[in-house]
Image: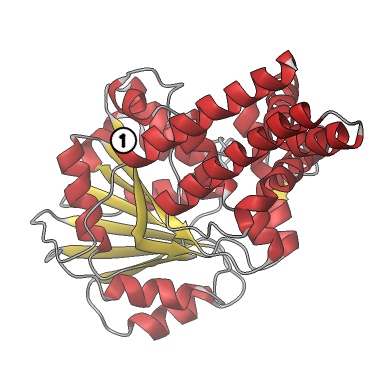
């Protein structure tokens, strides 16, 4: 009984932390008309994105509220006609510049190198850089709103997390865990105020950064070989004396990260090992997640079968508290709460399996992404 009570208390405390983050500390940039006077460069790295870059580009070209907006696109060795799609969509719009990327040198991974090429080829005028991925579609005032929030927060780097579009069962099981994890475990206010690099989070789908602070931190050159270049860039900014902030960007942007289960599986597999670090740390974290969020419903069924209704009731309460945390996270970030939250214990199991797969393939040096080795 005491073990089950401890489970209930632990899940309740973490769900309460999710509520505090979601209702008090999570920044929410205005989605309506906003205007900024700074020179802003939107940077878009592309590698074999012909099938989905169109909506992203059209949304960038439709941005409002930034009178001096430059859009710089880098074709990073695409073989599917991505550059042709960019030219067709952009036409003769003078705001857009298309660059041809160079292959990453030794010690660099593909995305950091592409981002660094973009950042260093914008000229001296931009005061703010906005990195956007090809699977992101921005609302008309998204860039202006993000820049305004960056300045209002007094931050060097702002990560306005897009609303993740989910369409398949696999999407609904895995994708909401991204927001749930940082809302549950990361103290957002402390993250903004603390200079500790370890207390950092960011999402590379949409990042807005003060250009001077970015260069002072070393930019993407400081994270050249890092799989999680977004989080590592946030840490580099902190090490250089800058501040970082997270925001709910669900009213500013949407993101359909993966189209199929193999893409989703491989996308998470390539980076989970870098999220947890040493395998023993990963094992401990996964075990804790399984204990707190997957064990309670199993324990409830087992206790009920064994004729222990009091234990079953407490275990079921722990499960419901876990579901509540998932609902809070979804509602705070524009996600789908019902009925997806009810399968949260299964989501945690899938996350554990993906983590195991990530370490397994890395050990065998079989991790790749978009035709390039990772890790």
Badge 1: few (under 14), some or many (20 or more) residues near its Cα, within 10 Å?
Answer: some
Which x, y percent locates residue 17? Answer: 45, 29
- The structure residue drawn at horizontal position 75% and vertical position 28%, both measured from the top left corner, is 310
Mark 1: which secondary structure? helix
User: Is residue 371 in view?
Assistant: no
**For residue 291, above or below residue 265:** above
| Residue carrying label 1 | 25
Quadrant in which the C terminus is drawn: top right
- The structure residue drawn at horizontal position 68% and vertical position 33%, both measured from the top left corner, is 273
Q: Point out the residue furthest to the top here.
A: 2
Residue 272 vs residue 5, the one in the foreground:
5
- Left or right, 79 with respect to 139, comes to right
- The structure residue drawn at horizontal position 27% and vertical position 29%, both measured from the top left corner, is 243
Q: Quadrant of residue 139?
A: bottom left
Residue 95 vs residue 353, the one in the foreground:
353
**For residue 187, above or below residue 116:** above
Q: How many marks?
A: 1
Quadrant in which the N terminus is drawn: top right
User: What kind of colouring is applied to the model shown?
Assistant: secondary structure
Which x, y percent locates residue 161? Answer: 40, 50
**For residue 91, above or below residue 108:** below
Q: Quadrant of residue 211?
A: top left
């Amino acid at each position: 009984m005491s073990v089950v009570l401890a489970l209930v208390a632990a899940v309740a405390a973490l769900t309460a932390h999710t509520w505090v983050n979601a209702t008090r500390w999570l920044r929410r940039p205005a989605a309506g008309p906003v205007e900024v006077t700074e020179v802003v460069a939107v940077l878009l790295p592309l590698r074999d994105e012909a099938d989905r870059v169109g909506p992203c580009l059209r949304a960038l070209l439709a941005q409002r509220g930034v009178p001096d907006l430059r859009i710089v696109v880098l074709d990073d060795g695409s073989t599917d006609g991505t550059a042709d799609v960019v030219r067709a969509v952009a036409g003769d719009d003078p705001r857009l510049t298309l660059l041809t990327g160079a292959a990453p040198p030794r010690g660099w991974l593909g995305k950091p190198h592409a981002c660094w090429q973009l950042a260093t080829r914008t000229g001296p005028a931009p005061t703010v850089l906005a990195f956007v991925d090809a699977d992101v579609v921005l609302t008309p005032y998204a860039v202006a709103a993000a820049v305004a929030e960056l300045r209002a927060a007094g931050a060097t780097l702002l990560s306005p997390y897009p609303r993740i579009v989910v369409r398949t069962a696999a999407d609904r099981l895995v994708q909401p865990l991204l927001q749930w994890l940082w809302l549950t475990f990361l103290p957002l206010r402390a993250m903004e105020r603390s200079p500790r690099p370890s207390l950092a989070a960011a999402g590379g789908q949409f990042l807005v950064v003060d250009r001077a602070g970015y260069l002072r931190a070393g930019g993407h050159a400081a994270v050249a070989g890092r799989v999680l270049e977004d989080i590592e860039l946030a840490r580099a900014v902190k090490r250089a004396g800058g501040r970082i902030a997270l925001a709910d960007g669900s009213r500013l942007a949407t993101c359909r990260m993966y189209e199929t289960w193999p893409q989703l599986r491989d996308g998470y597999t390539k980076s989970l090992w870098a999220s947890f670090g040493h395998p023993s740390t990963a094992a401990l974290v996964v075990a804790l997640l399984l204990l707190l969020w997957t064990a309670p419903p199993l324990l409830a069924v087992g206790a009920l079968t064994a004729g222990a209704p009091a234990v079953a009731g407490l275990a079921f309460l722990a499960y419901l508290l876990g579901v509540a945390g998932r609902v809070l996270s979804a509602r705070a970030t524009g996600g789908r709460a019902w009925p997806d939250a009810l399968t949260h214990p299964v989501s945690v199991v899938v996350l554990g399996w993906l983590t195991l797969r990530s370490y397994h393939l890395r050990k065998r040096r079989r991790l790749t992404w978009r035709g390039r080795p990772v890790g």
